[in-house]
Image (spheres, rainbow, N blue to C red):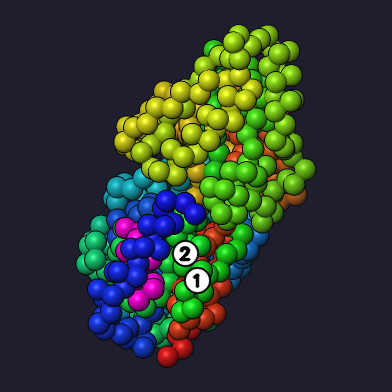
Amino acid sequence: MSKRLRLVLAVLPLLLLHFSCARANDPNTLVMIIESSPTNLDPRVGLDAQSERIDELLFDALVRRDEHFNLQPSLAEKWEIPDPLTYIFHLRHDVHFHNGQALTSHDVKWTLDSLLSGKLISPKASTYNSIASIDTPDDWTVILHLSKPYASLLWNLSDGAFGVVPNGSMGNLSQQPIGSGAFRFVSARQNRDLVIERNDSYWGTKAKVERVRFIVVPDETTQALELRKGSGDVLINALSADTVHALQRESKLEINITEGSNYAYLALNTRDPILKDVRVRQAIAYAIDRKKIIHYLMGDMAREANSVLPPQHWAYDPNAKDYAFDPATANRILDEAGYAKNNGYRFQLTMKTSTDATTRVLAAVLQQQLRAIGINLDIRTFEFATFYADVTKGAYQMHSLRWIGGNQDPDIFESVFDSASFAPKRQNRTYYSNSRIDELIRTGRGTVDQEARKHAYTEIQETVNRDVPYVNLWYFDNVLVHTRRVRNLQVSAAGNYDFLKTAELVN
């Protein structure tokens, strides 16, 4: 039993006794625990996970993502793409904002115009810079004219990325959000709680639960306590494996573990004098025992990855090259590359990490596993802001991070592997460059034919896996812990909060 698990088991009963007189929850309110308050509930602005996930409940997008990340109708009941530069959306006629105002094409146009014109300052604005003009020939039709083909436009008009706001809405929308979604905003207190209630006039399937109260609890031990004593009903993807295993003994709790899409990777700086050799990068990939890490460090709550894209995705390539744990092959490759062992070591590399405990433990395990093939791994730990600043500048040899949501659209390949996307301006922080990859990215972005796109993305995955700018590590499972008074929680691979639309309370 780990030290952390022993601590959790020892502390929780004491805290539970202390709070034994806590009042019961409102029978009509589901209490969900979140780690932090959303930074901005205007869907045109908020980029943090809490903002985007709560915005999905308050606002509707033109299209929605299904379980395979295909796009389906939402506010737009249908759409046409007569040519790569023209998108025609036909809106539903029965949608109203929470204030009773009908949602029309003019609201869609305002939402986009407020970003494109600079009236609203937002980091999301550049996402839509391929839109040259917007026509609204009637209340229910929106026509987007593009300056260049951009196949990912639809994705950026879908739930999680986009939400339609009322015509004329400006920066104060975050304080009193008015959307058309399944829930309406009630109140918010920074770093304390946020309350939403069911929209009984919703055009789609109405939520079962009357009200949801999000309570902000940053500390993991306190989160577990809130679940144990019943003052919190639901928590997703916030607890360590040790704490999850401790809570599995609680008769009043249920734990649902499902396959997720969030992805962890090890980045290798291809400009580095040692790491620029693809054979070194391949040897590192062979030297990592992912099965053992997933089992011992993550409690088997993850799956080995062989692509940036999640396995549920329509463009995922299950046949892309994988690197099973094979230290003998890793040693042979390094010998052939001319890196002979000298007193057991070949060369030294440095891995930068943040102070996050999980990341530091992972680095220590990688240090041990790479030592077995003669690589001395030096670990340098920094506060997250310093660590991340170095990563975004490309000032590192190795680091590990994760993609949460960003890997659900194949356009991520342009962001992280295109030669025109080098850091610090863009997110190609490994400085990987391959002209064939650049060509395939242009192909995938320039056509709306999904089969043609899939063919391009398949070759991208196979080529990138051969070149190893990223060592694919794993996909995290979605771990939902909830009290038994909550049922019918349908968790999506994306790990968002859509399960609140189907949740029911049993009192």
- Report the side of 448 relative to 479 (left or right): right
416 over 237 or under it: above or below: above
User: Pointer 1: what residue?
Assistant: 249
- Residue contact at pointers 1 and 2, CB within 8 angstroms: yes
Where disc 2 sits, the SS reads helix
Q: What kind of residue is marked 1?
A: Arg
Question: Taking 439 as reference, is 454 above or below it?
Answer: below
Tell me the residue at 39%/72% (across/down).
227
Whether residue 453 is situated above or below residue 423 in the rendered picture: below
Across and down, in percent, residue 318 comes to 75, 47
Residue at the image position 25 percent from the left and 73 percent from the top: 18
Please name the residue shown 60% across and 50% down the image. 295
**Residue 246 disc label:** 2
Q: Inspect the magenta stretch and tell me whether residue 99 lies in it.
A: no
Residue 468 image point, x, y percent: 64, 29
Q: Which label belongs to residue 23?
A: none
Residue at the limit of the structure toward the right, as seen here: 319
Extent of the magenta region: 219-229
Where is residue 496 drawn, in percent x and y?
A: 49, 63
